[in-house]
Image: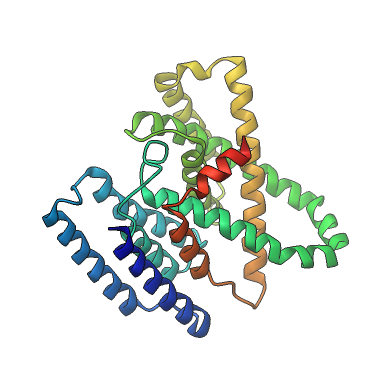
Amino acid sequence: MNIYFYSLIFVTGALSIFTDIRERKIKNMHLGIICFFALLLYFFYFLSGNLRLTPALILNPLLALIIGFILYVSGLWKPGDAKLFVTYSLLLPENPYSFMIPLSCFVLLINIFLISFLLISLLYIVGIINNKNAIIKKVISAHALFYLGQTIIITLCLSWIIQPLITILPIKNNIFLNFIIIFCGYSLVYKFMAKIRNILLIILVVAAGLVLRYAYMPYFFTYANFINYLKYMVVYSVIFYLLRALIDLKEEKPARIPLSPFMFIGALLTNTGFLWWLIRLAR
């Protein structure tokens, strides 16, 4: 089964990368044709008994659509990137990480994030080296420190809400999923707070999170768990800060870095042991 879906992934990658680099857009007609053939494959495999209709199979493209919309609204992706993400998610009916990460669209998003972050960071190394003095002054400036503090506050407040909800919902809780969900929420809140500055909103979020944690995560209210939680949230906040700085820097530059090659590589790696290798490396 994988060979046919992978063939469509290669076709999608070739078309999207070509038009994205040459014309700076991803054509809806190409994605529509790919999705049509993908649905035909689904229908054929359902009839042959090689594929079963499961909640994960239905939720995968639906949540991919929601994730793509969130990242588009938050300004991280272009409309074509969001639609391409949904298309690749549709072409990934199997999930080898299902016992750890519930849906293949989450695995795809993690792969895209890791690959794009590493490669885009490498592209900026030369610029950072050439402008290190100006960058150091900018990083330690009062504005940058305030911005980092704002990021930490947003991340902490969001995690108060998101982590208890993950406990309630019938999905597996792990560090990858936590990171992706909190990052999507952070991107939305960052966009929202750039227009509306209201301290009452933060207070309400913290209060709601406190109630949820007391109801569903009572073990959190111990010294060891709280310190461990703060450690993760500070690490998340620093990564979010760096990502947002890279995104802002990218928006300032006239040259555009297409996301379609990263999505193609991420889709190819979804059914491989790439994440296993990263987990072993982290350990």
The image quarter in which residue 9 lies: bottom left
The answer to whether residue 204 shows anywhere in this view is no
- Observer-nearest of 108 and 273: 273
Q: Quadrant of the N terminus?
A: bottom left
- Observer-nearest of 227 and 175: 175
- Furthest-right residue in view? 133
- The residue depicted at 63 percent of the width and 45 percent of the height is 151
Q: How is this picture coloured?
A: rainbow
Q: Quadrant of the C terminus?
A: top right
Q: Position of residue 88 (x, y in %)?
A: 37, 62
Number of numbered labels in the structure image: 0
Q: Give left or right: position of 172 versus 187.
A: left
- The residue depicted at 51 percent of the width and 36 percent of the height is 175
- The residue depicted at 63 percent of the width and 42 percent of the height is 237
- Furthest-left residue in view? 47
The image quarter in which residue 236 lies: top right
- Observer-nearest of 256 and 191: 256
Q: Position of residue 204 (x, y in %)?
A: 48, 34
Q: Position of residue 40 (x, y in %)?
A: 19, 66
Q: Position of residue 64 (x, y in %)?
A: 36, 55
Q: Give left or right: position of 155 versus 39.
A: right
Q: Give left or right: position of 87 versus 208.
A: left
The answer to whether residue 20 shows anywhere in this view is yes
Q: Give left or right: position of 143 versus 156.
A: right
